[in-house]
Image (cartoon, rainbow, N blue to C red):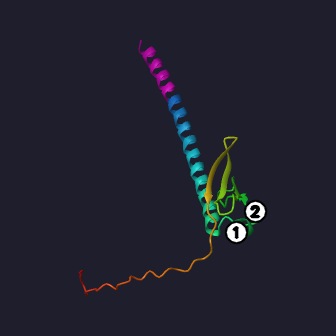
Amino acid sequence: MALVDVLVGVIMLGVAVVVLMGLTGHAVQSQRSGENLQVAAMILDQQLNLVQARGPDDYPSRFDDAEGVGEAPYENFRYKVEISSGAAGEAFKVVATVTWEENGTTRSAVVETRIAPRLGDEPDPDRRPVVQPDRLAGGAI
C-alpha cells in the first residue's frame, strides 16, 4: 500500500512539474514579446520625433533613406517612414512602421499621424513682464 501511495505521489508531482514548466515557458515568451513591443515603440517614437523636429517637408531631403535598421543592439528591427502631403495648408500624413522577427513570424507595429509643416524659425517672443515685480530681499511680498 505504501508503494502505491509513493507512486501516485510521484506521478502527481511529475504532472505538477510539467504544468509549471509549461507556464514558465509561456511567461518567458510573453516577457520577450513585451520587450520587443517596447523596443518597437521606442524606435517609432524616435522616427516620429525626427520628422517633427525637421518638419515633414524637410525630412525626406535631410534623411536620404526613410527606412533602415535599428541601431545596435536592435539590428533585428527595421523601420520605414512614409510621408504624404495633403492639400495646401493641411498637415502631412506620416506613417511609421517597425517590423521584426519573433518566433519565426514577422511582427509589426504601425503608427499613423498627422504632422503640420514647420512655418519657419520664429524669433523668441519677449517674455518679460509688462510691470516689473517688487522683490523684497529674503522674503515674499
Residue neighbourhood size for the residue with mark 1, other residues' Cα within 10 Å, grouped as few (<14), some (14–19), many (≥20): some
Q: Nearer the viewer, residue 137 or 14?
A: 137
Residue in the image at 62% along x and 63% along y? 116
Give left or right: position of 9 versus 72: left
- The circle on residue 65 is 2
Q: Which secondary structure type mostly characterizes the magenta part of the structure?
A: helix
Q: Which residue is mark 1?
A: 58
Residue extending farthest top: 1
Residue 9 falls inside the magenta stretch:
yes
Query: Considering the numbered disc 2 on the image, is that residue within a helix, a strand or a loop?
Result: loop
Which quadrant of the view contains residue 106? top right
Residue 79: quadrant of the picture: bottom right
Q: Position of residue 85 (x, y in %)?
A: 70, 59
Q: Residue at x 54, y 44 (%)?
A: 31
Q: Position of residue 66 (x, y in %)?
A: 73, 60
Going from the N terminus, do you reach mark 2 or mark 1 first? 1
Residue 128: x %, y % from top left? 42, 83
Secondary structure of residue under mark 1: loop
Relative horizontal placement of residue 119, taking residue 66 as reference (left or right):
left
Q: Is residue 12 above or below residue 31?
A: above
- CA–CA distance between discs 2 and 1? 13 Å
Mark 1: amino acid = Asp
* Image location of residue 109, percent across then percent down: 63, 48
Residue drawn at (68%, 62%), measured in percent from left and top? 88
Q: Quadrant of residue 117?
A: bottom right
Q: What type is the residue that disc 2 sits on?
A: Asp
Query: Which disc number belongs to residue 120?
Result: none
Give the magenta range.
Answer: 1-16
Q: Is 133 situated left or right of 60 in this image?
A: left
Queried whether the magenta region covers residue 22, the answer comes back as no
